[in-house]
């Protein structure tokens, strides 16, 4: 099991850094590494923890009057999506069932009764871990200083956004019982980690509607590579995946011929 996870992590890093399959240095491809990390973290406790990419954290005026029997859409709700979140769900009873919750789960497992989910009442939901991921550092730095700055600027941006997500988390009545969250700011294989409590001075003020709009706008950053403007042209001109694959293969062969000529 440990060896398989090690192989999966190494392969994930290889895909992230691949010039063939991640030529635009996309952020989203790095989610694979995030999920693997969290899987290792919750090993043995999958019965209460689960991983959710693109988890929404928002503030809604309707959250102060939640109705468990009705869907309550709110076009005025404001918030952001978290790249990867670890969720901790708790339930206290199974409707129309006798015995303990563990008995209900055991019987449902034996009978392969997946309909059990419709009979569970989730009484609390916490988010122990929030992760904001940025694209990996530049792969073509001019020097070591530029590479260093590439890493730290990405981590700074991720840290700012994940701190904002924590502020929204603690501002939501749905998470009023949660007092602590672990924050992860990541870029490629680099990361920062912090533990933030509800009473931290940075979280004493609930974000205003205007502030939340600004924060949401800040989250809408492009995810297309080193130079977005230069990449729009090639993306539009490439009509099919097949054409782009052939073009990449042609360039790869040209580069290989040049390497062989230099080696002679």
Image (spheres, rainbow, N blue to C red):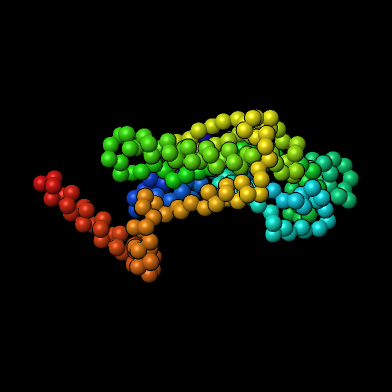
All told, the count of numbered labels is 0
Could you tell me if residue 226 is visible in this image? yes
The percent position of residue 262, horizontal first and vertical second, equals 13, 47
Q: Residue furthest bottom?
A: 239
Q: Is residue 151 left or right of residue 94?
A: left
Q: Nearer the viewer, residue 8 or 108?
A: 8
The percent position of residue 149, horizontal first and vertical second, equals 37, 36
The percent position of residue 5, horizontal first and vertical second, equals 50, 39
- Residue under the point 39% across and 52% down: 225
- Residue under the point 30% across and 34% down: 144
Q: Nearer the viewer, residue 61 or 232?
A: 61
- Residue under the point 78% across and 46% down: 122
The percent position of residue 221, horizontal first and vertical second, equals 48, 51
Could you tell me if residue 3 is visible in this image? no
Q: Is residue 242 left or right of residue 198?
A: left
- Residue under the point 50% across and 43% down: 133
Q: Is residue 209 left or right of residue 63?
A: left
């Amino acid at each position: 099991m440990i060896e398989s996870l090690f192989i999966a992590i190494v392969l994930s890093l290889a895909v992230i850094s691949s010039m063939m399959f991640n030529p635009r240095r996309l952020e989203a491809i790095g989610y694979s590494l995030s999920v693997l990390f969290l899987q290792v973290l919750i090993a043995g406790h999958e019965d209460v923890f689960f991983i959710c990419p693109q988890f929404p954290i928002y503030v809604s005026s309707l959250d102060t009057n939640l109705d468990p029997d009705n869907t309550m859409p709110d076009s005025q709700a404001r918030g952001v999506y978290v790249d990867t979140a670890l969720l901790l769900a708790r339930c206290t009873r199974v409707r129309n069932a006798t015995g303990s919750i563990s008995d209900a789960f055991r019987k449902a497992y034996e009978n392969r009764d997946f309909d059990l989910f419709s009979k569970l009442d989730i009484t609390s939901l916490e988010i122990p871990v929030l992760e904001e991921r940025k694209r990996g550092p530049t792969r073509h730095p001019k020097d070591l200083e530029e590479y260093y700055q590439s890493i730290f600027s990405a981590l700074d941006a991720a840290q700012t956004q994940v701190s904002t997500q924590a502020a929204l988390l603690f501002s939501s009545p749905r998470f009023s019982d949660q007092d602590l969250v672990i924050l992860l700011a990541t870029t490629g294989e680099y990361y920062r980690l912090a533990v933030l409590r509800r009473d931290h001075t940075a979280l004493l003020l609930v974000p205003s509607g205007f502030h939340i709009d600004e924060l949401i706008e800040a989250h809408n950053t492009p995810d297309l590579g080193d130079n977005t403007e230069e990449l729009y042209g090639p993306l539009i001109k490439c009509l099919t995946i097949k054409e782009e694959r052939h073009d990449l293969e042609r360039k790869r062969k040209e580069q290989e011929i040049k390497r062989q000529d230099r080696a002679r």
